[in-house]
Image (spheres, rainbow, N blue to C red):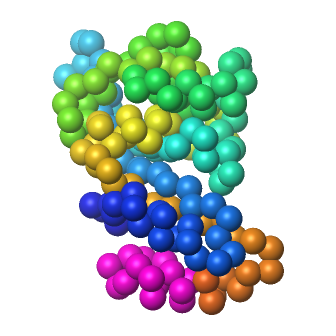
Amino acid sequence: SETGFFEAERAKVLSLPGVRAAVPSIAALAYVLRPGRAEPETLNVLGVDPQLEPLVRMHRLERAPPAAAALQALGNPDAILLPASFAASRSSSAGGSIEILAQSGVARLDVAGTLASTSGDESAFAVVGLATAQRLFGFEGRVMRLDVLVDDGRDIDALAADMRALLGPAFAV
């Protein structure tokens, strides 16, 4: 959902038989401010729970620190992982910082690492911690998406029907 839903809905999904995990995330656009440039550049940002994210997506880092350490760095409310191609073209690297404009205003984020390119797509996502995304994009207490992991043998169609019945018509399942 564009406006998101409350994190409490996650507990409802986790209560369903056969649900092993429900991993929250937020996807949003930020604008990168660069000195000497009149127009900001857009940056897709994915807010993730650093503890749960490895269950559903692997974020491969270009170089040290190891991916697990970089994801843990996202516990820092000012940390960001940048797509490698984005960082290279803007001379941003681990240990540096970047200024972005988000719904909450201008924020300076510390570059905790660079994400290796997987498709060469310049629109790849930067990654921040879930709490950081909630703060930056005005989603306090809310998320946009839950990736659900199910037990082996659980009927996916039946689970989807159970989720729709539990959550109601306002949720896309």
What residue is shown at x 56% (from left), y 24% (from top)? Answer: 73
Q: Position of residue 165 (x, y in %)?
A: 45, 88
Quadrant in which the N terminus appears: bottom left
Q: Position of residue 136 (x, y in %)?
A: 29, 36
Q: Which one is nearer the viewer's eye here, 102 or 17? A: 17
Q: In which quadrant of the rendered view does residue 149 lie? A: bottom right
Residue at the far right: name it: 152
Range shown magenta: 160-173
Indicate yes or no whether the magenta region holds residue 149: no
Q: Is residue 94 left or right of residue 141?
A: right
Indicate yes or no whether the magenta region holds residue 168: yes
Q: Is residue 169 left or right of residue 91?
A: left
In this picture, is 67 found above or below 112? below
In this picture, is 45 found above or below 24? above
Q: In which quadrant of the rendered view does residue 20 lie? A: bottom right
What residue is shown at x 56% (from left), y 67% (from top)? Answer: 14
What residue is shown at x 35% (from left), y 85% (from top)? Answer: 169
Can the viewer see residue 138 in this picture?
Answer: yes
Q: How many marks?
A: 0
Q: Which one is nearer the viewer's eye here, 73 or 34? A: 73
What residue is shown at x 57% (from left), y 61% (from top)? Answer: 22
Q: Is residue 7 left or right of residue 115?
A: left
Can the viewer see residue 123 in this picture?
Answer: no
Q: Position of residue 139 (x, y in %)?
A: 29, 49
Q: In which quadrant of the rendered view does residue 67 lie? A: top right
Q: Position of residue 105 (x, y in %)?
A: 19, 30
Q: Which one is nearer the viewer's eye here, 88 or 48? A: 48
